[in-house]
Image: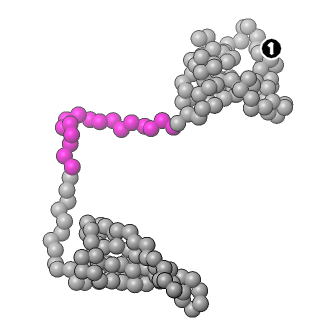
Amino acid sequence: MNAPPMLRRPIMGGAFGQAGFELATQPTITNGLHAVRFMVIHLTAGQIVSIAEDKREALAAARDLLKATAPAQQPEPNWRQSDLWPGIQLVPSTPQTPVSRRRREVFERSGGVCFYCRCRLSIHAFEVEHQRPRALGGDDSPINLVARCSPCNSAKRDRTAIEFMAGQTSGRQSFRQA
């Protein structure tokens, strides 16, 4: 019977340095049960530095051994990256959340204005609204979805678009003019 293959991946950083060590895993049978054995291998010396049944234990044992046998080193200097443009204050950009395809389609179909009051909308700050609310049997089909601003959404509540528009009087200033 052939021995199962070892899976290996490099270990870098900290006590392991930039290269020369690998974490190997090998399937085994321990007490009649399938298990995995973790080994830290020093590639240039061809030696196994530590073996354990737990990955953290294998890495910790290898770290401890390397620190104990390593020659005294001077502390690493505290490097600081130089400024690319000295004297210029850079303002970090706030990443915009991606806009879903459906929201983008609703926004484009509306022409970037509120369906009810015709105020300008931002693609990142508008609400998708059901002309016929889901509470009254409306669905999520594209013909039932419109872009609207937050004040119109709050005023409309669970009424249909026709009920909402009929309830607005011409003298009332609830709508903003575009």
Camera sees residue 62: yes
Measuring from the top left, give residue 61's x and y in whole percent: 36, 82
- Point out the stretch of residues depicted in magenta: 81-97
The reply, left or right, for residue 55 in relation to residue 121 is left
- Coloring applied to the structure: one colour
Residue 128 or residue 7, whichever sits in front? 7
Does 94 lie within the magenta span? yes
Q: Say if 107 sits above or below 59 in the image.
A: above
Residue at (77%, 15%) from the top-left corner? 165
Measuring from the top left, give residue 46's x and y in whole percent: 28, 81
Q: Say if 156 sits above or below 178 in the image.
A: below
Residue 95 or residue 91, whichever sits in front? 95
What is the magenta segment's predominant secondary structure? loop
Q: Say if 163 sits above or below 83 in the image.
A: above
Does 148 lie within the magenta span? no
**Amino acid at pointer 1:** Ala
Pointer 1 local density, CA inside 10 Å: few below 14, some 14–19, many at least 20: few
The reply, left or right, for residue 171 in relation to residue 32 is right
Disc 1: which residue: 166
Tell me the quadrant of the picture where the C terminus can be found.
Answer: top right
Residue at (74%, 32%) from the top-left corner? 140
Camera sees residue 56: no
Q: Secondary structure at mark 1?
A: helix
Query: Residue 73: which quarter of the image?
Result: bottom left
The reply, left or right, for residue 25 in relation to residue 175 is left
**Residue reaching furthest front?**
1
Instruction: Give the total of numbered labels.
Output: 1
Measuring from the top left, give residue 31's x and y in whole percent: 57, 92
**Residue reaching furthest right?**
136
**Residue reaching furthest bottom?**
31
